[in-house]
Image (cartoon, helix red, strand yellow):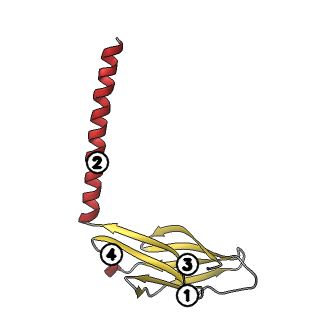
């Protein structure tokens, strides 16, 4: 069990950012590892904010890891050997299929509601 808590703050210009807080006694420095398909991501930064008592985690997303489908990144605390969080990137044809399917279902439901509403209006007049 990790004493670190990770909260996502934003994904901006290809860099995932989060805020790490430590709950416990003493002063500890986080030992964070970010992996994609069990391969470590390079360039991960953990920057301490001395005034706020937290750290800012910055994870640059390598361009070669942005491909069709779903890409999952795991953020782990190496000291506690636990996963703190994860994030996923979805793109390409797989995502398009899901969105088109959902849109078709929504259109069908909307048409059904319109017919039911029109029938209701005719019956009540």
Circle 1/circle 3 CB separation < 8 Å: no
Q: Nearer the viewer, residue 79 or 33?
A: 79
Which disc is residue 66 wearing? 4
Query: Could you tell me how far apart the alpha carbons at marks 1 and 4 are, in whole angstroms?
Result: 25 Å
Separation of marks 4 and 3 at Cα, in angstroms: 20 Å
Disc 3 crowd, CA 10 A, few/some/many (<14, 14-19, 20+): many
Of discs 1 and 2, which sits in the foreground? Answer: 1
Q: Which residue is mark 1?
A: 78
Q: Residues within 10 Å of mark 4 (few under 14, many from 20)?
A: some
Left or right of 19 on screen, residue 42: left
Which residue position is annotated with label 3?
Answer: 57
The picture quadrant where one finds residue 109 is top left
Q: From mark 1 to mark 3, how far is it between C-alphas? A: 14 Å
Earlier residue among tags 1 and 3: 3
Q: Which residue is mark 2?
A: 103
Report which quarter residue 57 is drawn in: bottom right
Q: Earlier in the sequence, mark 1 or mark 2?
A: 1
- Counting residues from the start of the chain, the first of labels 2 and 4 encountered is 4
Packing grade of label 1 (10 A; few <14, some 14-19, many >=20) is: some
Residue at 55% in and 85% down:
81
Q: Residue furthest top?
A: 125
Residue extending farthest right: 25
Callout 4: helix, strand or loop? loop
Query: Closer to the observer: label 2 or label 4?
Result: 2
**Distance from label 1 to label 2 (Cα)?**
42 Å
> x and y percent of residue 115 in the render?
28, 28
Which comes sooner in the sequence, label 4 or label 3?
3
């Amino acid at each position: 069990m990790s004493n670190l808590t990770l909260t996502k703050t934003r994904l901006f210009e290809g860099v995932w950012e989060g805020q790490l807080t430590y709950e416990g006694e003493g002063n500890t420095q986080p030992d964070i590892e970010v992996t994609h398909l069990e391969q470590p991501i390079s360039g991960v930064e953990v920057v301490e904010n001395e005034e706020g008592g937290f750290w800012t985690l910055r994870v640059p997303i390598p361009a070669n890891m942005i491909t069709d489908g779903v890409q999952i990144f795991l953020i782990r605390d190496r000291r506690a050997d636990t996963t703190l969080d994860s994030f996923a990137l979805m793109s390409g044809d797989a995502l398009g299929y899901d969105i088109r399917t959902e849109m078709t279902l929504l259109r069908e439901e909307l048409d059904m509601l319109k017919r039911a509403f029109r029938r209701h209006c005719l019956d009540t007049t």
